[in-house]
């Protein structure tokens, strides 16, 4: 057995990537950072390379890769710098890599994340969009290539912890599972008067009450599309039927999700809202190790509240359930339209309330296909981006 497990972090400069490095720093005796990757943030990747001395660094952007190469050469550090999508896929499948943290945001993470699964790695999945787009391909890769798929999303990591160890082979039904209860805080606009939502700014949408995250997932949390993507993610991760997955709004984000059993028992996983807990859990699984996260103080936990989700306030949630029911490439179309709409909102080209409207129109316009292959996914993703882009142009206003 190797002395230290090799880890590659796809998206190391983002919120999840930085939290992962924080956990790894505490366990340098158990893990070795083999590869770090980013899109174009040269400064942060350089700093990470100097601190963690990986064998490889990848910049998706070719010009940024050139800059990083120069800077590392000047610092006399022997890190091999790769560029582009091919570089990302290569480090995800390196023989010296045992675990891959998939923490690129959005569809850009699909191919390298799939490459890690197909190379039979332990895949720590934060990049939920990849699974939403290509669920059947991941399920097949895990089955056929002996990969391990461990959820990093706090909700799915909580569900994983509340299920028996053999749930994947036995199936939820034989394990006595009745429902998976995904909790969600409801985001920053849970109680905002409906007639004010159209005026919401990117700054307000990104100010999540409980979690510090990247901008895209923050906006997704504000529309609750994030919870919708998580419903689809739960379907693939746990082989759960749509009617077995329920969303519960829980504003305090202390219970990260629950599993309800046939006998009436409900198992929940609790903890402070800090992504280092699920990250440490997945890195150490089936063991446990320190994460640096503060422990819950039950004497200070005043109340835990629960509410049903408001589908009128959060139409994105309804659209995600509909895409899951439609199946085939519909979830990839939903995801692509959402990425386009969220970026347009962040760029102040459309209003907050236009995000689900763009997604809904795209789902109506772009016909999905039943066959989920890499080719149909990528093609429908491109068609959805074009249709959503046209809708954004038609709706564009100064916010
Ligand atoms: N943040 C959380 O608490 C949280 C919780 C649960 C799940 N997740 C999921 O984890 C994933 C990452 O979220 P995040 O909040 O960490 O995002 P983030 O802070 O925006 O970081 C995204 C990372 O992906 C890289 N990246 C962006 N576009 C890329 C491209 N085209 N090609 C290659 N790399 C690219 C970024 O590089 P640059 O820095 O160079 O741009 C950065 O390293 C998302 O799928 C999200 O849904 C996040």
Image: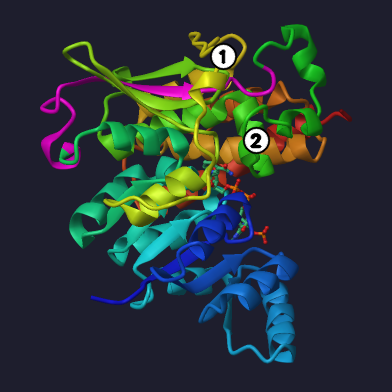
* Magenta part of the chain: 167-189
Q: Is residue 197 above or below residue 70?
A: above
Count of numbered tags: 2
Residue on which the image places disc 1: 302
Find residue 175 and report its horizontal and vertical position in percent: 14, 28
- Residue at horizontal 17 percent and vertical 14 percent from the top: 262
Front residue of this view, candidates 1 and 82:
1
Q: Is residue 158 visible?
A: yes
Q: Is residue 87 above or below residue 139?
A: below
Q: State which mark lies toward you, 2 or 1.
A: 1
Residue on which the image places disc 2: 218
Q: Earlier in the sequence, mark 2 or mark 1?
A: 2
Front residue of this view, candidates 96 and 297:
297
Q: Residues within 10 Å of mark 2 (few under 14, many from 20)?
A: many
Left or right: residue 140 versus residue 80 is: left
Front residue of this view, candidates 106 and 388:
106
**Ligand 1 neighbours mark 2 (CB distance < 8 Å):** yes
């Amino acid at each position: 057995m190797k002395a230290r497990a090799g880890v590659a972090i796809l998206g190391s400069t983002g919120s999840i990537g930085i939290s992962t490095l924080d956990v790894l720093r505490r366990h340098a005796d158990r893990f070795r950072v083999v590869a770090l990757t980013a899109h174009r943030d040269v400064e942060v990747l350089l700093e990470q390379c100097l601190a963690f001395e990986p064998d490889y660094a990848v910049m998706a952007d070719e010009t940024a890769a050139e800059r990083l190469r120069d800077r590392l050469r000047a610092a006399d550090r022997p890190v091999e710098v790769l560029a582009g999508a091919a570089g990302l896929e290569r480090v995800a499948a390196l023989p010296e890599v045992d675990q891959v943290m998939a923490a690129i945001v959005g569809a850009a993470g699909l191919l390298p994340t799939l490459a890690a699964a197909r190379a039979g790695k332990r895949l720590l999945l934060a990049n939920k969009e990849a699974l939403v787009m290509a669920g059947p391909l991941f399920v097949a890769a895990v089955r056929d290539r002996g990969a391990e798929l461990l959820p990093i999303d706090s909700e799915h990591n909580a569900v994983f912890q509340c299920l028996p160890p053999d749930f994947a082979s036995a199936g939820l039904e034989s394990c006595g599972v009745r429902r998976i209860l995904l909790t969600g805080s409801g985001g920053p606009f849970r109680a905002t008067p409906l007639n004010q939502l159209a005026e919401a700014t990117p700054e307000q949408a990104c100010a999540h009450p409980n979690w510090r995250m990247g901008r895209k997932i923050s906006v997704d949390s504000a529309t609750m599309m994030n919870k919708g993507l998580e419903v689809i993610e739960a379907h693939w991760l746990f082989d759960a039927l749509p009617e077995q997955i329920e969303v519960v709004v829980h504003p305090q984000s202390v219970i990260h999700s629950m599993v309800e059993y046939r006998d009436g028992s409900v198992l929940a996983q609790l903890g402070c809202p800090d992504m280092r807990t699920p990250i440490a859990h997945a890195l150490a699984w089936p063991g446990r190790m320190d994460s640096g996260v503060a422990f819950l103080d039950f004497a200070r936990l005043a109340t835990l509240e629960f509410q049903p989700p408001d589908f009128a306030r959060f139409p994105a949630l309804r659209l995600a359930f509909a895409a899951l029911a439609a199946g085939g490439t519909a979830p990839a179309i939903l995801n692509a339209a959402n990425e386009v709409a969220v970026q347009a909102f962040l760029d102040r080209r459309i209003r907050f309330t236009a995000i689900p409207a763009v997604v809904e129109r795209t789902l109506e316009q772009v016909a999905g296909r039943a066959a989920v292959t890499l080719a149909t996914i990528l093609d429908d993703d491109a068609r959805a981006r074009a249709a959503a882009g046209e809708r954004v142009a038609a709706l564009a206003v100064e916010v």
